[in-house]
Image: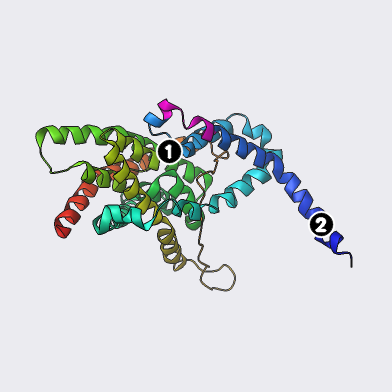
Amino acid sequence: MNTSAAALPSPTTAQRWRGRLPGLLLTGAVAAAAMGLAPLPWLQRHGISALTLAIVLGIALGNTLYPRLAASAGAGVGFSKHWLLRAGIVLYGLRLTFQDIGQVGVGGVLTDALVLTSTFALAWWAGTRWFGLDRESALLIGAGSSICGAAAVMAAEPVVRGRADQVTVAVSTVVVFGTLAMFLYPALYQLNLAHGWIPMDTQAYGVFTGSTVHEVAQVVAAGRAVSEGAANTAVIAKMVRVMMLAPFLIGLSMLLARGRTGAADGQRAKIVVPWFAFGFVAVTTHASALRKAGMKPLLLALLLFGWLLAGGLGINLGVRALLG
């Protein structure tokens, strides 16, 4: 047997990769454009990350040029969504060290955990009971609000088994209220500083911001608006929250699997353990999804935003009082 011939890829494999190439080039180009634009000062001042830019560019493409490119690019876009989306949780985790965690202490970790669980539980309950949303939409909005914004929405999608239009709506609500938080938090801090309603120094503000604001870039912007020290603490508290994404998704997968049964043999559905990458480009989303969804997802996101602001503050103060 010729070993060199055996090492060559089969024609089927080669054809499969040739079919993916246009879509991979398209998603790569959009991701590169987003990463190239993200360092611009105006975008950084407004907390707009490369991920958010990629989503915006993807939505623009999805509603303009992509329908004409779908036939040739669909395979590569699907590969990017399915595999590259699940490739980056280890890279995300490498950004956080135990020394970083030590800077926010047990109180910061406990605060993050309580904010995450309470916000997600509220999203699940209120989304399905109060607003009458389908479970998938409520869970996706809850994941984005409680953990790390758009990245968490896309990471939760394979666990929740949400549709592309549900992901689009969830990401949109996260962007809206995360951007609002980015400007509101520093204003409220200065107002509180002037009136002395609540004892809060820059470190406490940083933990509060990192434990309640949606996206990492928005956390940085909200922290820097107060001080560089507040921004550093906020980012660490936020990254601790991001680190909780993996166990959160595994737990959610186990919880959802309890209610799912196999289609053929009645066995329980397998648990999906997803991984995510912050370079995912959502070129399959369409603006019509937002119109069809109506106001209910936005109202749920508004409720969660209010909880993150008021309930999150209560949790922060409670943990500080508990731990002295």
Query: Callout 2: 10 Å neighbours few (<14), some, many (20+)?
Result: few
Identify the amino acid type marked 2.
Answer: Leu
The numbered mark, 1 or 2, whose residue comes first in the sequence reads 2
Judged from the image, the secondary structure of the residue bearing numbered disc 2 is loop
Residue in the foreground of this view, choosing between 146 and 203:
203
Q: Name the residue under label 1.
A: 172
Residue lying at the far top in this picture: please name it.
Answer: 42
What x and y, as percent, mark residue 159? 49, 57
Query: Could you say which quadrant of the image residue 24 lies in?
Result: top right
What x and y, as percent, mark residue 60? 54, 30
**Residue drawn at the location 26% of the way across and 56% of the way down:** 105
**Residue drawn at the location 29% of the way across and 52% of the way down:** 103
Residue in the foreground of this view, choosing between 213 and 206:
206
Is residue 86 among the parts visible in the rendering?
yes
Judged from the image, the secondary structure of the residue bearing numbered disc 1 is helix
Identify the amino acid type marked 1.
Answer: Ser
Residue 254, disc:
none
Is residue 124 among the parts visible in the rendering?
no
Residue 41 on the magenta segment: yes
Residue 71 on the magenta segment: no
**Residue drawn at the location 26% of the way across and 59% of the way down:** 106
Q: Give the range drawn in magenta.
A: 34-43
Of discs 1 and 2, which sits in the foreground? 2
Q: Is residue 205 shown left or right of residue 20?
A: left
Q: Name the residue under label 2.
A: 8
Q: In which quarter of the image is the C terminus?
A: bottom left
Q: Which colour scheme is used?
A: rainbow
Query: Could you say which quadrant of the image residue 203 lies in?
Result: top left
Q: In this view, does 165 lie above or below 162?
A: above
Residue in the foreground of this view, choosing between 277 and 286:
277
What x and y, as percent, mark residue 25? 66, 38
